[in-house]
């Protein structure tokens, strides 16, 4: 006897129309080569040590503001010039070492701002094509081992982190390029030994994630960071 087949729901593509007024579009997918992004990281400010250490979100930030932070500011007769609320309203996770560092930030405009945490994740799906040893016109090859190459790339990314964060959107993924020179031979291209390399990366503030891969590049004309290779610069 033939097995009964359940009716299938309509194909999702047939259900897609214009979004309802005010509806949010689905989040941008993770970049090719990066892992699929999970739910956005909750915006939060983290104090890592000492008095007041802990994690603060919009739910418990007032306890910090009206508690030890206010006490320390008043005891030292300081004037508040900027506050931490922006970090909790923004996307991502920000860290600061101590409560005093937060006091300094709020009362001294020359003090550094808390830093957004970013996870650097190597995109093997694309990156590993550059570790096969088979040099082609489209696939230059690293001659240093993968961990060394990743170290070079992550050092370059961290060097340009302030620019990457300032120029990336709060939602979705923002694509960037970085060009750098190791100062010694790190790979081969069809043109021969190469010291320079290019990194392709995508930044997601809402997931605290940077997905990257890279390759030796004999065609770099400029070093630095930019949203296209033509825009590379310091």
Image (tube, rainbow, N blue to C red):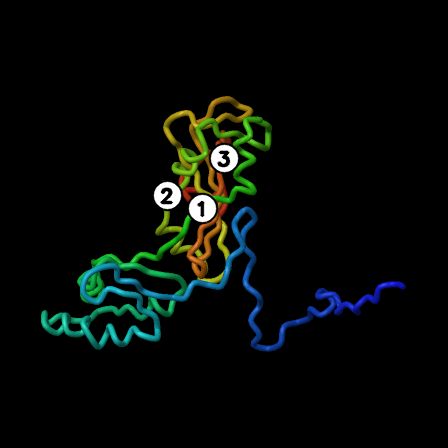
| Measured Cα–Cα span from mark 1 to mark 2 | 9 Å
Q: Position of residue 44 (x, y in %)?
A: 35, 66
What residue do we see at 39% from left, 44% from top?
Answer: 157
- Residue most toward the right? 1
Location of residue 83 with respect to 166 vertically, above or below: below
What residue do we see at 9% from left, 69% from top?
Answer: 76
Mark 2 Cα shell of 10 Å, populated few (<14), some (14-19), many (≥20): few
| Measured Cα–Cα span from mark 3 to mark 2 | 20 Å
Label 1 vs 3, first from the N-terminus: 3
**What element does badge 3 sit on?**
strand
**What element does badge 1 sit on?**
strand
- Residue most toward the front? 1
Label 3 vs 2, first from the N-terminus: 3
Of badges 3 and 2, nearer the viewer stands 3
> Which residue is the site of mark 2?
234
Q: Position of residue 39 (x, y in %)?
A: 49, 63
Quadrant assignment for the C terminus: top left
**Residue 58 image-quadrant placement:** bottom left
Task: Tell me: 141 left or right of 74.
Answer: right
Of badges 1 and 3, nearer the viewer stands 3
> Which residue is the site of mark 3?
215
Label 1 vs 2, first from the N-terminus: 1
How many numbered callouts? Answer: 3
Mark 3 Cα shell of 10 Å, populated few (<14), some (14-19), many (≥20): many
**What element does badge 2 sit on?**
loop
What residue do we see at 83% from left, 67% from top?
Answer: 4
Mark 1 Cα shell of 10 Å, populated few (<14), some (14-19), many (≥20): many
**Residue 80 image-quadrant placement:** bottom left
């Amino acid at each position: 006897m033939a097995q009964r087949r359940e009716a299938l729901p309509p194909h999702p593509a047939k259900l897609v129309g214009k979004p309802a007024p005010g509806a949010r579009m689905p989040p941008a997918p993770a970049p090719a080569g990066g892992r699929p992004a999970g739910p956005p990281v909750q915006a939060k400010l983290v104090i890592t040590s000492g008095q007041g250490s802990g994690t603060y979100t919009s739910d418990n930030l007032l306890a910090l503001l009206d508690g030890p932070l206010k006490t320390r500011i008043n005891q030292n007769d300081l004037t508040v010039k900027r506050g931490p609320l922006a970090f909790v309203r923004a996307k991502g996770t920000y860290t600061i070492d101590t409560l005093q560092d937060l006091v300094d930030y709020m009362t001294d405009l020359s003090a550094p701002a808390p830093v957004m945490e970013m996870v650097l994740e190597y995109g093997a799906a694309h990156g590993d094509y550059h570790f096969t040893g088979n040099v082609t016109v489209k696939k230059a090859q690293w001659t240093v081992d993968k961990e060394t190459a990743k170290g070079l790339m992550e050092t370059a990314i961290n060097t340009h982190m302030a620019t990457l964060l300032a120029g990336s959107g709060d939602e979705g993924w923002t694509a960037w390029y970085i060009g750098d020179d190791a100062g010694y031979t790190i790979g081969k291209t069809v043109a021969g030994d190469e010291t320079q390399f290019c990194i392709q990366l995508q930044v997601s503030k809402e997931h605290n994630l940077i997905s990257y891969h890279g390759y030796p590049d004999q065609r770099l004309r400029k070093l630095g960071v930019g949203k296209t290779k033509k825009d590379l610069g310091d």
